[in-house]
Image: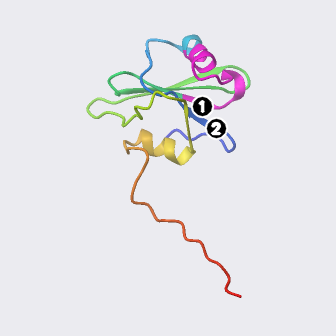
């Protein structure tokens, strides 16, 4: 499973991206459409129109790396919002790549306690 290093942010490109693009084309999308620095070391995630393929682009200090996952039967539950780039936690990225739909529902609710005086 793909795991980002601690401190690395994960950005999800909304909608679909033409994944015939390779490293240079995806770096240009990250810079121009997502308004992010592709040399930052953060992860930039892209999905094709049929939601069968994901590419993740990142800079690792000496060059770009491109990670790819293609599904044969299922599809990714890619967010359809095209308003703005989404930022995910590394756990959410893992869930997305495993086929779960974001945002997840049904998790434990946060409880807040107060001290009674």
On whether residue 29 falls in the magenta region, the answer is: yes
Residue at far right of view? 61
Q: Is residue 36 above or below residue 94?
A: above
Measuring from the top left, give residue 75's x and y in whole percent: 31, 33
32 and 75: which is toward the camera: 32
Q: Which mark is residue 53?
A: none
Query: Is 5 inside the magenta-drawn segment?
Result: no
Left or right of 55 in this view: 70: left
Q: Residues within 10 Å of mark 1 (few under 14, many from 20)?
A: many
| Residue 46 falls left or right of residue 65 | left
- Outermost residue toward the bottom in this view: 117
Label 2 CA crowd tier, 10 Å (few <14, some 14–19, many 20+)? some
Which range of residues does the magenta coloring cover?
A: 26-44
What residue is pinned by disc 2? 9
Quadrant housing residue 51: top left
Give 66 or 11, whichever is nearer the viewer.
11
Q: CA distance from mark 1 to mark 2?
A: 6 Å
What residue is rendered at 70% in x and 22% in y? 39
Q: Going 60% across and 13% down the picture, which residue do you hit?
A: 28
* Whether label 1 touches label 2, CB < 8 Å: yes
Find residue 4 and report its horizontal and vertical position in percent: 60, 39
Q: Quadrant of the C terminus?
A: bottom right
Q: Looking at the picture, how far across and down is residue 103, in whole percent?
A: 43, 47
Residue 109 position (above or below residue 75): below
Instruction: Please give left or right for residue 43 compared with residue 1 in the image.
Output: right
Name the residue carrying label 1. Answer: 43
Asked if 91 appears above or below 74 in the picture, the reply is: below
């Amino acid at each position: 499973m793909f795991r980002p290093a601690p401190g690395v942010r994960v950005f999800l490109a909304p909608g679909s991206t033409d994944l015939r693009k390779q490293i240079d084309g995806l770096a240009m999308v990250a810079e121009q459409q997502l308004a992010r620095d592709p040399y930052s070391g953060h992860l930039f995630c892209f999905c094709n129109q049929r939601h069968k393929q994901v590419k993740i682009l990142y800079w690792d200090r000496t060059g770009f790396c491109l990670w790819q996952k293609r599904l044969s039967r299922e599809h990714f539950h890619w967010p359809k919002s095209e308003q703005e780039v989404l930022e995910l936690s590394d756990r959410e990225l893992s869930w997305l790549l495993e086929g779960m739909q974001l945002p997840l529902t049904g998790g434990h609710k946060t409880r807040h306690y107060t001290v009674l005086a």
